[in-house]
Amino acid sequence: MLRRSVLFVCILLCAAGAHAQERLTQFDVESADVPTPWRVIHLDKKVAATRYSVTRADGVLGIAAEADHSIALLARPVEVDLHRTPVLCWRWRIDTPLLKADMATKAGDDYAARVYVSFALPPDEIGWVLRGKLALARAIWGDAVPDAALNYVWDNRYPVGTRKPNAYTDRTRMIVAQSGASQAGKWVVERHDVLQDFITEFASPQARLIQLAVASDTDNTGETAHAGFADFQFVEKDAACFAE
């Protein structure tokens, strides 16, 4: 089985600025294709691709993800000054959590919904050990491998607030933002201080955010999942996520 979570953090897109409080999912109409700069990345050609579209659900226009024993990434480049606007806000929903997934195992590394952000570290923060790890990863996956990533996940078993290294690589840290079925079937607002989370996990206050991505993946468990993502934006630390 392809090491999917390593690939998730290996896909970087060309830089395109995203200004403070810009809605990164500002769509006008429903569409079978999510418009640029969003792009579907089919990670494993041997496995079906998760399908993405722009769909309205309960009055909210956003990204719909449909996974059926499948995997694919929907990503866009982002460049934000996290010291000015460190908080990432969004809305998401799932129909139901997965049943067989377990984020502590490679075989269970599936999620009904995940949101993740990738970073580049300052060169002077990359020691020889990390440099060697990254060099090895880039020899396998190419020069697009990022230095580190955070994953905010809608899990099926671990409580909100759980933090774990990814089952495949400690360069990706998993943060449980929602868990279980109590909030399933409705839009849930999330608010996370990405800068503080990154400092907590990687002790690097000067890392540069380079990518935002979403996914539903069920290729390991063979389950189905339906998720929605909407209204991504970065705001100041004390600012409200959305106007009332």
Image: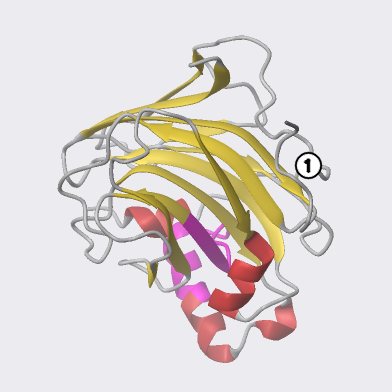
- The residue sitting at 25% across, 40% down in the picture is 218
Crowd class of label 1 (few under 14; some 14 to 19; many from 20; radius 10 Å): some
Quick check: 166 above or below 226? below
* Residue 221 in the image, given as x and y percentages of width and height: 17, 45
Which residue range is magenta in the image? 134-151
Query: Where residue 97 sits: x, y (%)?
Result: 27, 40
Up-down relation of residue 131 to residue 34 (above or below): below
* Residue 149 appears left or right of 112: right
Q: Residue type at mark 1?
A: Ala
Q: Residue at x 27, y 34 (%)?
A: 96
In the figure, is residue 218 to the left or right of 141? left
- Left/right placement of residue 106 relative to residue 126 reads left
Return the residue nearer the eye: 40 or 243: 243
Give x and y (percent) for residue 125.
Answer: 68, 84
Q: Per the image, is 180 magenta?
A: no
Q: Nearer the viewer, residue 68 or 147?
A: 68
Vertical arrangement, residue 58 with respect to residue 163, above or below: above
* Number of residue marks: 1
Q: Nearer the viewer, residue 85 or 169?
A: 85
Say if the magenta span includes residue 148.
yes
Residue at the extreme front: 244
Rendering coords of residue 9 (x, y %)? 49, 56
Q: Quadrant of residue 223?
A: top left
The single residue placed furthest to the bottom in the displayed view is 128
Residue 107 lies in quadrant: bottom left
Look at 70% across and 70% down and name the residue there: 207
Q: On the rendered image, what quadrant is the C terminus found in?
A: top right
- Say which residue label 1 marks: 18
